[in-house]
């Protein structure tokens, strides 16, 4: 499937802001517990489709649906309930270093389509196949099962290293009703 540049509703075409940074911002917006659901949807529409999308009130629902499809790289939402081992914002330094080491791409100097960026993320070197980029070393460490380590000193060393690179948890500041609504929206966006 080609990397889309436009979304179409009926006869109207909307230019998509395809840069990976915009998609990451949309992810940050969708998972921010301090933003209401309606505001989240408007922010995602604005980020992806600009003023044209934001001002087309009658197509907001369809634009949000097309935005979700774009953010999922054309794939269907999954019901994957695995604990995340990565966060784009928290791990950006590791991502930049990994792109530089694996692809010789300086992310601060280029504009990359979100779908291309996602494919490159999936292709980063991993220890199962020889060399391993820094991002995947961190991800592997975060998910390493320390219960299999017999030597207490080694197990403690790995546990301490896991604490050093652990993802920071965002504490929800929402009511139960707001949390349920945020969870529903998050499922729609299918956050990594």
Image (cartoon, rainbow, N blue to C red):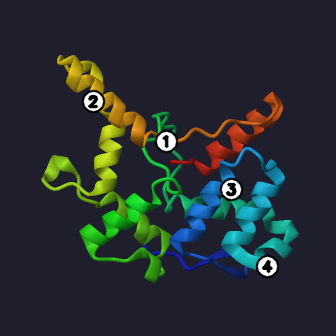
As measured in the structure, the alpha-carbon distance from the residue carrying label 2 to the one carrying label 3 is 36 Å
Residue 29's mark? 3
Please provide percent x and percent y for residue 61.
77, 59
Mark 2 or 4, nearer chain start:
4
Q: Dot 4: few (<14), some (14–19), or many (≥20) neighbours within 10 Å?
A: few
Residue at screen point 48% across, 56% down = 75
Callout 3 touching callout 4 (CB < 8 Å)? no
Lateral position of residue 164 relative to residue 172, left or right: left
As measured in the structure, the alpha-carbon distance from the residue carrying label 4 to the one carrying label 1 is 34 Å
**For numbered disc 3, what is the local secondary structure?**
helix
Callout 2 touching callout 4 (CB < 8 Å)? no
Callout 2 touching callout 3 (CB < 8 Å)? no
Disc 2 designates what residue?
157
As measured in the structure, the alpha-carbon distance from the residue carrying label 2 to the one carrying label 4 is 52 Å
Mark 3 or 4, nearer chain start:
3
Residue at screen point 69% across, 49% down = 32
Residue at screen point 37% across, 61% down = 121
Please provide percent x and percent y for residue 161.
33, 36
As measured in the structure, the alpha-carbon distance from the residue carrying label 3 to the one carrying label 1 is 18 Å
Q: Dot 3: few (<14), some (14–19), or many (≥20) neighbours within 10 Å?
A: many
Disc 1 designates what residue?
167
Between disc 4 and disc 1, the foreground one is 1
Disc 4 designates what residue?
51
**For numbered disc 1, what is the local secondary structure?**
loop
Between disc 2 and disc 1, the foreground one is 2
Between disc 3 and disc 1, the foreground one is 1
């Amino acid at each position: 499937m080609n990397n889309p540049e436009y979304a179409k509703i009926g006869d109207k075409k909307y230019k998509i802001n395809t840069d990976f940074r915009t998609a990451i911002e949309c992810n940050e917006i969708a998972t921010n517990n301090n933003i209401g659901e309606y505001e989240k949807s408007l922010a995602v529409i604005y980020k992806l489709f600009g003023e044209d999308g934001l001002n087309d009130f009658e197509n907001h629902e369809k634009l949000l649906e097309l935005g979700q499809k774009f953010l999922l790289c054309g794939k269907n939402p999954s019901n994957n309930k695995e604990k995340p081992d990565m966060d784009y914002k928290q791990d950006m330094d590791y991502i930049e270093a990994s792109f530089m080491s694996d692809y010789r791409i300086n992310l601060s100097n280029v504009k990359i389509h979100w779908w291309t960026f996602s494919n490159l993320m999936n292709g980063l070197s991993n220890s199962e196949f020889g060399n391993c980029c820094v991002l995947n070393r961190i991800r592997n460490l975060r998910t390493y099962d320390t219960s299999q380590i017999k030597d207490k000193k080694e197990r403690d060393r790995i546990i301490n290293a896991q604490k050093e690179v652990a993802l920071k948890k965002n504490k929800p500041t929402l009511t139960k009703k707001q949390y349920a609504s945020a969870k529903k929206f998050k499922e729609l966006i299918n956050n990594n």
